[in-house]
Structures are given as structure tokens and as C-alpha cells.
Image: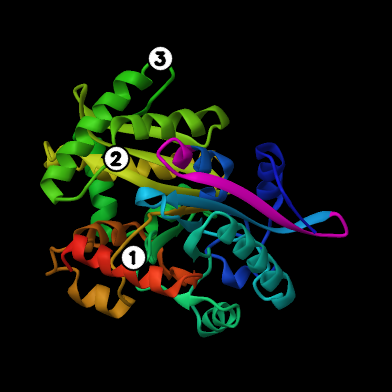
């Protein structure tokens, strides 16, 4: 039986969910923060809608999906999206097939042209076969990063530090010697700190030619996750001047680095290294056992390691920085699609290519 859940019921389910086969999860068995109601509430403030559904066995919720819907222009329909979900035992073909059929029903009821899912699964031949048997097709593009670096926090800080590249350890210590301090925004300072954060983001955006959200978006992020202690805004400063900042999230024993920025000033003081070291400490204090650095070039490790010193395009500078922190490279299964209207799907992709100029 399938029953849509209210926010409280959904959050209880997500908090208690564990994947039955941990070899298919990134670093823990728990659900991803992008499947929490707070994340859906954030997206609903910016033009999306959301619904949630679960499959029950003997009255107990055993699988579920939080689905987001983005309206298309002129009221022509929607696109359904399941970020880092559904929450299901993928090796149980009956359970996963039933849950996907429920998602299909909801998607069609919301006039979706197609549905994109991005499971929280590590790429493997077997995981791809499972998704194909469910009638899903690999998408040509992902919404969330396909590859990431995850740091194991199930060690003391000295061991975590010793696992880093020598230059990264040196830069962390150098930042301390050169007077960089890192503080966490408080309720008393958050409005001013969010203003500083946005200013740093826009500077980073202009320098590296990528887009950022509005100040309203980041304030909503903070306001939604801060009451439960699931987000922190960290600011690295020198003599009171903000040099770099990031938002770190924690949920279910996992931590994520989604948004970061830096002014480019005082680079010789290595503020971004101090910032990440403080973020690791915060995640440890929250009881997290993994820290996801969230997004590197979508290439195999041998390619990354052979080319990172010379490449300056895309996420290559990001990889050069993140690799130093001693984490492990993971590749997710990426995005998969269920197409309900083939002609509309082709039209959407064609128009999107024209808009992007690719």
C-alpha cells in the first residue's frame, strides 16, 4: 500500500532509513540530505513543488521517494526529479519495481514529460543493470556531481591530518601561523555574515565564471537547516577581514560541503585550507563519519592524477585543491530517466541544447 506522507512522517522515515546493502552506498547506510523535507521546502520557495510517497510492508514504511516537480513554461507540464533517491533496497527487485511504479503514477498525475532520478549509489556494472531492468535509461547529463571526494572521519584529527597530502598539511599549519582564524556564524551575527558570504560568492563567481544563487536563496538554506543544527556558516578571517567562507551540512552521520567562496585576497595566508580544516572539525563534533567535498571532474582517477597539474578548465582547479585532503574518489551512478512522452522529451533536449549553445 502507498500513502503520501506529511512532513513529520516523512522525516521520521528518512531518519530511520538504512540501505540494506552498504556496498552500494557512499560511506554510510543513511539517507541523503537532499531527500529531507527541509531540502524540498527550500526548492518549493523557488518555483518547485514536492510530494512524498512510501511503500509499506505489513504497515511499516520500507521504501520511499521525495519527488520534486519543476513547471515548464506556458503550463505545458512538468519535469519530475528525485535527488539522491529513491530510498529503497535496490537489490530487492520487487520492492524497487513497486516503488518506481508509484513514482510513475505520481509523475504522470503531475503531467511530467519525464522523470530524472539520481540514486545515492556508487557506480558499478551491477547497479547499472538494476536500473536498466527497472525501465530507466542513463541520462546524458547529471544535475548533481557524478564524482566526488569523501573523507573518512572515523579517525582522530591527527590521523585525518596525516592522511592528507604533505602540501595540504603544510598549508593548514601555515594558515594558523599567518594569523587566519575561522569562526562560525551565530544567530547574533548571521545576517551580517550572510551578507559577507554573498559578497565573497559573487567575487568568486566573477573570478571563475560560474553562476551563484541569490542572497535570498542562501538565507533560506540557512533558515531551514539551522534550527536542527544541520548547517553551519564558517568564515575565515585575517584581522577581522573575511577572506573565505563555506556552508557545511550534516545529516544522518554524513557531512557535505555544497557552497564555498573566497575573495582571492591574502592567498599567501591559505584561508581556504584553514576553512576546510575547521569544517572537518565541525563535522567531527557533530558525530559525522564522512565528509563529502561534493564535485570534481567526471574522470577516472588515473586521468585526474595525470592531468590535474596542467588543466585549468571546469572543475580541474577544484580537484587540485580537494585531492590534497586525503579523501577517496567516488563515482555515483549519475542521473537516469523514465520517459513518459518521447516526443516532448526530444523537444525539451533539443531546446535545451540550443539555449546552452552546446
**Tag 2 or tag 3, which sits nearer the N-term?**
3
- Residue under numbered circle 2: 213
The magenta segment: 42-59
> Which one is nearer the viewer's eye here, 195 or 73?
73
- Which residue is denoted by mark 3 in the rendering? 188
The residue sitting at the right extreme is 58
Say whether disc 1 or disc 3 marks the residue closer to the N-terminus.
Answer: 3
Viewed as shown, does residue 52 lie left or right of 119?
Answer: right
Tell us which disc is closer to us: 3 or 2: 2
| Residue at the disc numbered 1 | 348
In terms of depth relative to the viewer, which is nearer, 25 or 213?
213
Please, what secondary structure does the residue beneath circle 2 have?
loop
**Residue 128 at x, y percent in the picture:** 52, 80
Local secondary structure at mark 1: helix
Query: Where does the C terminus fall, quadrant-wise?
Result: bottom left
Q: Quadrant of residue 10?
A: top right
User: Which is in the foreground here, disc 1 or disc 3?
Assistant: 1
Give the x, y percent position of residue 126: 56, 83
Amino acid at each position: 500500500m502507498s500513502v503520501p506522507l506529511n512532513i513529520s512522517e516523512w522525516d521520521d522515515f528518512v531518519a530511520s532509513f538504512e540501505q540494506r546493502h552498504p556496498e552500494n552506498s557512499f560511506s554510510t547506510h543513511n539517507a541523503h540530505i537532499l531527500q529531507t523535507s527541509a531540502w524540498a521546502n527550500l526548492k518549493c520557495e523557488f518555483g518547485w513543488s514536492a510530494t512524498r510517497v512510501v511503500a509499506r510492508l505489513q504497515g511499516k514504511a520500507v521504501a520511499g521517494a521525495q519527488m520534486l516537480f519543476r513547471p515548464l513554461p506556458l503550463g505545458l507540464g512538468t519535469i519530475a526529479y528525485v535527488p539522491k533517491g529513491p530510498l529503497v533496497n535496490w537489490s530487492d527487485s520487487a520492492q524497487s519495481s513497486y516503488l518506481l511504479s508509484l513514482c510513475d503514477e505520481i509523475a504522470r498525475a503531475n503531467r511530467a514529460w519525464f522523470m530524472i532520478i539520481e540514486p545515492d549509489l556508487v557506480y558499478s556494472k551491477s547497479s547499472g543493470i538494476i536500473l536498466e531492468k527497472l525501465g530507466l535509461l542513463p541520462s546524458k547529463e547529471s544535475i548533481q556531481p557524478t564524482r566526488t571526494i569523501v573523507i573518512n572521519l572515523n579517525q582522530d584529527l591527527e590521523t585525518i591530518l596525516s592522511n592528507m597530502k604533505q602540501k595540504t598539511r603544510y598549508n593548514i599549519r601555515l594558515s594558523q601561523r599567518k594569523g587566519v582564524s575561522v569562526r562560525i556564524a551565530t544567530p547574533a551575527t548571521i545576517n551580517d555574515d550572510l551578507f559577507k558570504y554573498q559578497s565573497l560568492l559573487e567575487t568568486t563567481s566573477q573570478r571563475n565564471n560560474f553562476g551563484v544563487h541569490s542572497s535570498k536563496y542562501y538565507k533560506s538554506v540557512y533558515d531551514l537547516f539551522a534550527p536542527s543544527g544541520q548547517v553551519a556558516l564558517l568564515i575565515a578571517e585575517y584581522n577581522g577581514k573575511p577572506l573565505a567562507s563555506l556552508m557545511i551540512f550534516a545529516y544522518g552521520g554524513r557531512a557535505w560541503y555544497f557552497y564555498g567562496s573566497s575573495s582571492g585576497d591574502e592567498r599567501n595566508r591559505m584561508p581556504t585550507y584553514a576553512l576546510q580544516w575547521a569544517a572537518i572539525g565541525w563535522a567531527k563534533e557533530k558525530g559525522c563519519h564522512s565528509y563529502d567535498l561534493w564535485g570534481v571532474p567526471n574522470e577516472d582517477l588515473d586521468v585526474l592524477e595525470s592531468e590535474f597539474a596542467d588543466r585549468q578548465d571546469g572543475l580541474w582547479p577544484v580537484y587540485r585543491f580537494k585531492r590534497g585532503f586525503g579523501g577517496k574518489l567516488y563515482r555515483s551512478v549519475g542521473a537516469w530517466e523514465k520517459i513518459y512522452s518521447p516526443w516532448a522529451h526530444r523537444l525539451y533536449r533539443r531546446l535545451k541544447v540550443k539555449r546552452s549553445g552546446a
